[in-house]
Amino acid sequence: MTGDIETLEKLSTAYKESMPADLRETKSFDWYLEAVYEDPKIARNAHQRVADMFDYYGTTYDETEGVVEYRLASEDPLHDGENTFYGKVIHQSIHEFVNKVKSGARRLGPERRIKLLLGPVGSGKSHFDKQVRKYFEDYTLREEGRMYTFRWTNLCDVVKDQDPADDVVRSPMNQDPLVLLPVEQRQSVIDDLNDRLDAPYTIQNEQALDPESEFYMDRLLAHYDDDLQQVLENHVEIIRFVADENKRQGVETFEPKDKKNQDETELTGDVNYSKIAIYGESDPRAFDYSGAFCNANRGIFSGEELLKLQREFLYDFLHATQEQTIKPKNNPRIDIDQVIVGRTNMPEYKDKKGDEKMEAFNDRTKRIDFPYVLSYEDEASIYEKMLNNADVPDINVEPHTLEMAGLFGVLTRVEEPDAETVDLLSKAKAYNGEIDEGDDIDVKKLREEAAAKAEIGEGMVGISPRFIGDEIAEAIMDSKHRQRGFLSPLTVFNFFEENLEHHGSIPEDNFETYYRYLETVREEYRERAIEDVRHALAYDIDEIQSQGEKYMDHVMAYIDDDTIEDDLTGREQEPDETFLRSVEEKLDVPEDRKNDFRQEVSNWVSRRAREGEAFNPQDNERLRRALERKLWEDKKHNINFSALVSASDVDDDERSSWIDALTEQGYSEAGAKEVLEFAGAEVAKAEMED
């Protein structure tokens, strides 16, 4: 067993290997100059570094949607997928956010704007913001994301009134060492770097030294008679700079406090009263660079619930964005370099948007909408992730449970369609990708209609995933208390109904509508449960394969205007139109659309053949459904429906085989019995009435 446990030695080795080799080393300015010539990206600004970070962890391109999906969000490689994001709308939002950062990297304007993540509660904007900060920390630990700053040393040798405690002073703003070069000489270096740079942007650095560093530079240059080389060789050390939110370096999260206690020094820094007695009040050495903008320099500033700040407090963001400077009290202006991200919910956004006095602030924001997920299967993946990340009791989540919970959430978020041919449920299914070739549904048009109809955008109102996740959690614990080893849609529906009116974020005016949506979901689940029961009663995989092959043989003969050999007589005959229509009618394919459907499945088979894949009707959703329904029609006459209705026959062999068939679909044994009672009785009654 000793080989399976971690030892202190192994833990220490793993930690050391995860840290940059030069983390504790000091370098000379000459070394840094050589390093940036070798790799100019070391001197990137914050927007450029963050933009490259997104690409570093990998991307995939969705040609259909025209959206780049970034692996740090779609797969979360650092945490084994624990913090994965689901839903096309979310990845569209992330794509838009990154595009703004990349535009800022090219100095197209967004570098001077706040990236404002706007969305309803629980839409994932805070989660995404946190993810970006965590990955930025990791990126700066890696060779590809490295950056450096500097510290002043041996100051007491030259600056006679320097406090001995301040003999070594780190750059208060963690500035890039290039700012130590005068502007003209610095630009000469930067021009060389851009000649060597392989990137879609150019290196720029027009910043001034922060006031304290400027003070030291002036004193030292005076001492060495303007010999810059002597200053940099004798009094500057280059050190690795790693972003760390907990240490408040390179990443800073700013949260609004009580309105009465808001103070701009939280953003820009304040006088260091412990140093006033040593240096005097107006001395730049007596300033404390502890403001949020100071801490975030060279990295990411994250403003939580940004628009809850007082109007006067938000004015500090005007210079921080447009001029990329801050002006603290009792200190000269300070240049900053950071990606400023803000997050806000809908009420605060509407309030500030309508405030004429906030026009300048609003003009300096780039809004990125973070709507709720609008695909119910993606929504189900959110709940599945929640369960996977938790210590869930030993309980079986029955088929359709999470999908139907997700469907309920989606119905509350999508706009009611205008078209008479498309109801809300059909629209939700279309958004989920459930569109058959013959369906007269234009998803793009539905989205455009919804965008025009919604106040801000579709998916910006509705029930939060948090509410649904909370009710799923309650339903799980209730099932455990009642010693039910499974969680079914019926149990979850009951919790939705019981607690809908107890949730503070759901407006009272919506209760009646949401109850109606819940009934729609119940009916949808009923149809799916009936399909599952029919599948259990009549399903035969060999028969499905056989009938599928027969169907395709006759389709190919029909398309090629050819004959086909009869299985019994061996004679050539025309394709069996009666058989073909018996399959197609199970999908309500009309007579005038049969050719389209046959060509569709023919093309599908041809594509698979070119890819070297054998024909399997299970892999084609529409064909599989049609064959299963035909098989049901063929076999239902031999089913003992009285046994299906009667609970007293629960232990007989026939009923046990049905339960076994349901467990193969993912049901627990107890859950299979419940679905037989719920849907089986309706199947039986309908067939017995026929």
Image: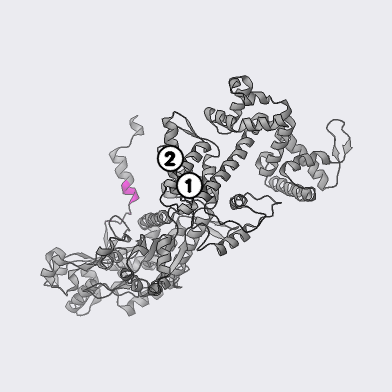
Q: Is 235 on the left-hand or right-hand side of 352?
A: left
Task: Name the kind of residue labelled 1 in the image.
Answer: Ile
Query: Disc 2, disc 1: CB below 8 Å?
Result: no
Q: In which quarter of the image is the N terminus?
A: top left
Of label 2 and label 1, which has the lower sequence position?
Answer: 1
- Does residue 41 sit above or below 505 in this rendering? below
Secondary element type, mark 2: helix
Q: Position of residue 87 (x, y in %)?
A: 52, 52
Q: Quadrant of the C terminus?
A: top right
Q: Can residue 81 be seen in this view?
A: no
Is residue 17 one of those drawn in magenta? yes
What numbered label is drawn on residue 382?
A: 1
CA gap between label 2 and label 1 equals 13 Å
What numbered label is drawn on residue 473?
A: 2
Q: Which residues are drawn in magenta?
A: 15-24
Q: Quadrant of residue 47?
A: bottom left
Q: Is residue 56 visible?
A: yes
What numbered label is drawn on residue 211?
A: none
